[in-house]
Structures are given as structure tokens and as C-alpha cells.
Image: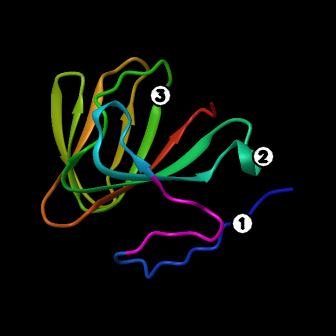
Amino acid sequence: MGVVHRYKGDGASEFDWENVEAGAYTRGGAVGGSMRVVIGPEDGAQNFAMRYFEITPGGQSSFDRHEHDHGVYILKGKARVLMGWEVHEVGPGDVVYIEPNEQHQFESIGEETLGFLCVVPPK
């Protein structure tokens, strides 16, 4: 049977769900971040994990390269996204696809915290 995690935020600034714990996101040189697994293996998901990240202004995600691809949906804030050696500016409503083995990094720019959903294969 599926799982529902009810949304607790106000939609403008808070992104939080019932029974979903936030943890510090500091892996691989990430600065100013937190991460929640909104849907994952603990919920019974076998084919994907959906994670929510927040990165404070001036912070950044880890500089990474993985064998899997990523689907990213920007919910709030603005970012510079490094993909390969290209840099793109993105904001709310933008969608980013990161290919397998493509180096990537998100840098939060502006005054608002960056918030995005990221869908990846389960670990």
C-alpha cells in the first residue's frame, strides 16, 4: 500500500511534510544545506527516491558525478547550476535534467533559500 506524507508548510516559505525528518546536508563539500527523503525505500518505493533539498543563500550542493541520472524541480529561490562545464541560472518552476556521470553542482544565489525536489534511483 502507498504512503501519504501530508504537507505542513505554507507554500511560500516552508516546505515540510508529516513524518519526514530533515537532516543536515554536508556530504562532499556541501555548504548550508538540509535534505529530506520525501519518498524512498522506507515508504516502499522500489524504483525511485524523491528528495527535498534546501540550500541557504551563498551555500552550495556537493560537486558530484554519479552513475545515475537526476530529475530536479526548483520550488523556491534561485541557483546557478553547473552541468559539465556549462553554468545555467534557474528559478522557481524550472526543471533540470542531469545525465549519468555528468558533473554537477547547485549554488544558491539571491536572498531566498533555494528549495528543490530531486528524483533519483533508490539506493
| Picture disc at residue 4 | 1
Q: Is residue 16 above or below residue 57?
A: below
Report the mark closest to the observer, 3 or 2.
Answer: 2
Element type at mark 3: loop
Kind of residue at badge 2: Gly
In which quadrant is the N terminus drawn?
bottom right
Which residue is under mark 3? Answer: 69
Q: Residue at x 52, y 42 (%)?
A: 119
Q: Is residue 123 above or below residue 93?
A: above
Q: Is residue 29 above or below residue 31?
A: above
Q: Residue at x 15, y 34 (%)?
A: 87
Crowding near the residue tagged with mark 2, few <14, some 14–19, many ≥20 C-alpha atoms within 10 Å: few
Q: Residue at x 45, y 34 (%)?
A: 70
Question: Residue 105 at x, y = what percent?
Answer: 27, 35
**Predominant secondary structure in magenta?**
loop
| Residue range of the region highlighted in magenta in the rendering | 14-23
Number of disc labels: 3
- Precedes in sequence: disc 1 or disc 3: 1
The image's colour scheme reads: rainbow
Cα distance, mark 2 to mark 1?
12 Å
Asked if residue 20 lies in the magenta stretch, the reply is: yes
Crowding near the residue tagged with mark 1, few <14, some 14–19, many ≥20 C-alpha atoms within 10 Å: few
Which residue is under mark 2? Answer: 44
